[in-house]
Each structure stands twice: as structure tokens, then as C-alpha cells.
């Protein structure tokens, strides 16, 4: 951690643009922030600016796509809405995490979420595989733990129902993706995230699973 910045806020969210629309049948509430780097010194600063710019481009592309789709829907019949928000999730000594949430409503509603995780040690955006040593087979180990958690939750709450491949569902969950959505919470715990409808009924919304610290430490050694 010797590359941590000396002073300043390092990463932070700043307002970039807003788009709001309201009619009898349609509404949109789009608030776009961008990740900025300022007031810091240290070897990781250059990487921090580079990674934040890459994330900002991705956020801008997603915003433009959804806004374009919404404007096209205004010409169609029926009702529709779009909400797009970005918020800070974690900002501690080691990590900075922001969450992008988009909720679209047409005939039905759907929510999609995306997390962006930055290391304050390196200044880089971090993917899940970056956290573990090469050859750790982290996908299998993490997936086994998540399946265990799913079964425990279903046993404790009959209203919960996860799609599991081992239960005869050919499309059910068996292993996390290589580019799996995740974030690191304020307690420095790794949290695996699934979008609405990905591992359970749409009515359950998005799902998240906190990985045990012992499992994470084992995969990092």
C-alpha cells in the first residue's frame, strides 16, 4: 500500500449532465456523474486518471444508448419510464466503488446494475480475477460457496427460489462468469452480484452474496 496517495480525495463523483422528461405517458430521470481524480500525488495518480477516464467513457456510452432508446419509445404507444443513477458505494483507505443503476419500464420493468471498483494502491480499475492468485480456480471455489448460500437461504425462507443447474434446470446457475459483477464493501468484503432475473425470479430483484473472508484469503495466498 506504499503507493497510496499522499493528500486529497483521490477518486470522487462529480456531476456531468442531467436529463429529465415528464409527460402523461413517459418519464425519464437521468443523472450522470463521472469519476474524477484530483488533489492527489503519488505513483498511482497517472493510472487513476487513466482508469477513471475509461470508466467514464463506458458510462457515457451506456447513458447515450439508454437515452436514445427512451426517446425512440416516445413515438410508440403505451407507457414507459427510465431512471439512471450513479452513486458512491465504498470510499475507504483501500477501495473506491461506484454503482450504476438503470431501471427501464415498458410493458414490464427491468433493473440492471453495474459496479466499478478502483484500487487506491494502484489507481487501476479492478476486475474480480485481479483479486486472486493465478491458478487459484477462484470461479469454482466462489461458485460452490454461493450455491451453498443459496441453499441455506431457500431452506430458511420458502419465498426464495434460486435457479440451480444441479436441480435439473439446464439454464440454472452453476458457476460465476469470468467477468462477474462484484464490489468491495465498506468492510473490505468481496460481494458477488447478479442482476435481476439472472439467478432467480424477476420478482426477487438483484441478488448479492458476501464471500467469507477465509475463502478470499485462501484464494489470495
Image: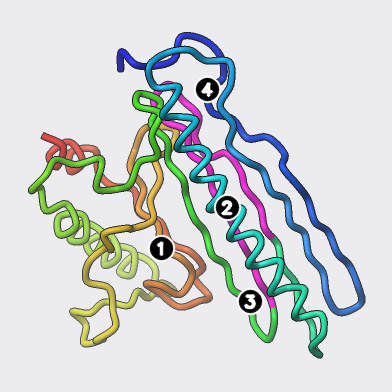
Give the residue drawn at x 36%, y 48%: 191
Q: Which of marks 1 and 4 is nearer the N terminus?
A: 4
Q: Residue furthest bottom?
A: 77
Q: Position of residue 3 (x, y in %)?
A: 34, 16
Vertical relation: 212 (above or below) 221: below
Q: Which of marks 2 and 4 is nearer the N terminus?
A: 4
Q: Residue furthest right?
A: 24
Vertical relation: 86 (above or below) 1: below
Does the stretch in magenta take in 157? no
Q: Is residue 47 left or right of residue 216?
A: right
**Residues packed near mark 1 inside 10 Å, few (<14), some (14 to 19) or many (20 plus):** many
Give the residue drawn at x 83%, y 59%: 20
Label 3, label 4: how far apart the Cα atoms are: 36 Å
Magenta-drawn stretch, dominant element (helix, strand or loop) = strand
Vertical relation: 212 (above or below) 141: above
Give the residue drawn at x 63%, y 76%: 109
Q: In this view, does 76 lie to the left or right of 159?
A: right
Q: Which of marks 3 and 1 is nearer the N terminus?
A: 3
What residue is pinned by disc 2? 59
Give the residue drawn at x 64%, y 59%: 63
What residue is pinned by disc 4? 10
Tag 3 and tag 1, C-beta contact below 8 Å: no
Q: Position of residue 215 (x, y in %)?
A: 17, 43
Does the stretch in magenta take in 100? yes
Quadrant housing the N terminus:
top left
Q: Which residue lies furthest to the top in this view?
A: 6
Magenta extent: 84-105
Q: Which of marks 3 and 4 is nearer the N terminus?
A: 4
Quadrant housing the C terminus:
top left
**Label annotation for residue 109:** 3
Amino acid at each position: 500500500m506504499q503507493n497510496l496517495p499522499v493528500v486529497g480525495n483521490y477518486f470522487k463523483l462529480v456531476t456531468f449532465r442531467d436529463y429529465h422528461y415528464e409527460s402523461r405517458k413517459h418519464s425519464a430521470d437521468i443523472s450522470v456523474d463521472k469519476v474524477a481524480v484530483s488533489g492527489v500525488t503519488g505513483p498511482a495518480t497517472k493510472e487513476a486518471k487513466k482508469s477513471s477516464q475509461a470508466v467514464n467513457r463506458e458510462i457515457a456510452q451506456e447513458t447515450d444508448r439508454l437515452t436514445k432508446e427512451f426517446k425512440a419509445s416516445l413515438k410508440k404507444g403505451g407507457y414507459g419510464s427510465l431512471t439512471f443513477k450513479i452513486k458512491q458505494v465504498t470510499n475507504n483507505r483501500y477501495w473506491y466503488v461506484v454503482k450504476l443503476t438503470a431501471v427501464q419500464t415498458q410493458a414490464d420493468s427491468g433493473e440492471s446494475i453495474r459496479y466499478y471498483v478502483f484500487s487506491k494502491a494502484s489507481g487501476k480499475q479492478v476486475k474480480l480475477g485481479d483479486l486472486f492468485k493465478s491458478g487459484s480456480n477462484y470461479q469454482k471455489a466462489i461458485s460452490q460457496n454461493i450455491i451453498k448460500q443459496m441453499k441455506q437461504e431457500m431452506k430458511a425462507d420458502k419465498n426464495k427460489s434460486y435457479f440451480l443447474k444441479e436441480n435439473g434446470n439446464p439454464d440454472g446457475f452453476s458457476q460465476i462468469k469470468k467477468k462477474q459483477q462484484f464490489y468491495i464493501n465498506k468492510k473490505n468484503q468481496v460481494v458477488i452480484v447478479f442482476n435481476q432475473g439472472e439467478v432467480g425470479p424477476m420478482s426477487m430483484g438483484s441478488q448479492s452474496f458476501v464471500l467469507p473472508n477465509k475463502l478470499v484469503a485462501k484464494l489470495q495466498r
